[in-house]
Image (cartoon, helix red, strand yellow):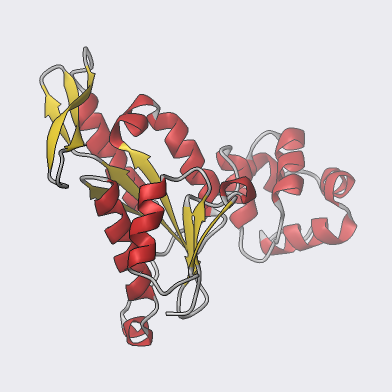
């Protein structure tokens, strides 16, 4: 193990300490990685692929599922593999979801006690499970742990596994994903058209000018030229099978 494991400065001190216990001295570095657009934990694996882990307590996630989804969408573009680790157990109830937190006792033992209750939301349990299915389908790993200590050991295990060259022979060594270009599906799909190489800024200008993806690929050549220039317009037309 020689690659540093970067931890954001706002992550709990106890997680950093747990990580340091299982790593060689000096390899756990706490710094401002969130400010650079990365998730809470980041390292390079044996192939030089960037692995990122975003940590959320379950009550934090349930308080703003849409906001967490937006955050993950932005973090996807900063790494080769993204994992969401959700901390603390929970239980679906007829009225919503009850969360639990670990309360430490003297001597190091602990007991899970009721945490925040999400009430008057009877469909929240089903919504949350469905949401996690969608996150996994987007190529984001989801790991659930019972405590900060469990989170630290999960991250450490993933780090160690990613540093072993023999594991690269596995078919899916890195969980693949396609980072989204834009929330607007017309802009996103335009960016993904093979061979056209349209960036998000140009795609946005094209969609603003012609309304939809279909509007762009069926637009007059003169209109495309006015937005993206003659050479790029001709490339776009050629790749969608148009002569003019």
Q: Nearer the viewer, residue 32 or 206?
A: 32
The residue lying furthest to the top in this view is 120
The reply to whether residue 124 is in sight is yes
- Most extreme residue toward the front is 106
Query: Which quarter of the figure is the N terminus placed in?
Result: bottom left
Q: From what the image shows, is residue 71 above or below residue 64?
A: below
- Residue at the image point whose x is 32% and y is 74% from the top: 161
Residue at image coords 52%, 76%: 48
The vertical placement of 8 against 97, above or below, is below
Residue 37 higher or lower than 101, as above or below: below
Whether residue 172 is visible here, answered yes or no, is no
Q: Nearer the viewer, residue 228 or 4?
A: 4
Rendered image quadrant of residue 147? top left
Q: Position of residue 12 (x, y in %)?
A: 41, 44
**Marker count (numbered):** 0
- Locate the C terminus by quadrant: bottom right
121 relative position to 168: left or right: left
Residue 130 coordinates in the image, percent (x, y): 26, 38
- Residue 21 location, x and y as percent? 34, 65
The correct choice, above or below, for 200 with respect to 3 in the image is: above
Whole-percent x, y for residue 236 in the image:
74, 58
Residue at x 87%, y 49% (from the top left corner): 225
């Amino acid at each position: 193990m020689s690659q540093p494991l970067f931890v954001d400065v706002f992550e709990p001190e106890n997680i950093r300490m747990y990580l340091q216990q299982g790593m060689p001295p000096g390899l756990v570095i706490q710094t401002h990685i969130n400010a650079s657009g990365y998730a809470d934990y980041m390292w390079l694996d044996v192939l030089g692929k960037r692995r990122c882990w975003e940590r959320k307590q379950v009550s934090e996630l349930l308080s703003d599922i849409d906001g967490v989804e937006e955050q993950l969408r932005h973090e996807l573009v900063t790494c080769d593999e993204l994992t969401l680790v959700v901390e603390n157990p929970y239980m679906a109830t007829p009225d919503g979801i009850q969360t639990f937190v670990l309360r430490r006792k003297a001597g190091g033992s602990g007991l899970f006690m009721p945490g925040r209750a999400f009430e008057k939301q009877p469909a929240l349990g089903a919504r949350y499970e469905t949401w996690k299915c969608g996150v996994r389908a987007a190529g984001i790993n989801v790991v659930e742990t019972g405590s900060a200590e469990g989170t630290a050991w999960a991250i450490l295990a993933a780090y160690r596994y990613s540093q072993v060259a023999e594991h690269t022979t596995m078919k899916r060594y890195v969980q693949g994903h396609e980072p989204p270009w834009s929330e607007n599906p017309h802009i996103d799909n335009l960016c993904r058209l093979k061979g056209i190489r349209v960036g998000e800024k140009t795609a946005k200008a094209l969609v603003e000018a012609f309304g939809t993806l279909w509007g762009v690929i069926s637009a007059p050549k003169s209109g495309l030229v006015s937005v993206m220039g003659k050479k790029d317009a001709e490339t776009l037309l050629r790749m969608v099978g148009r002569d003019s």
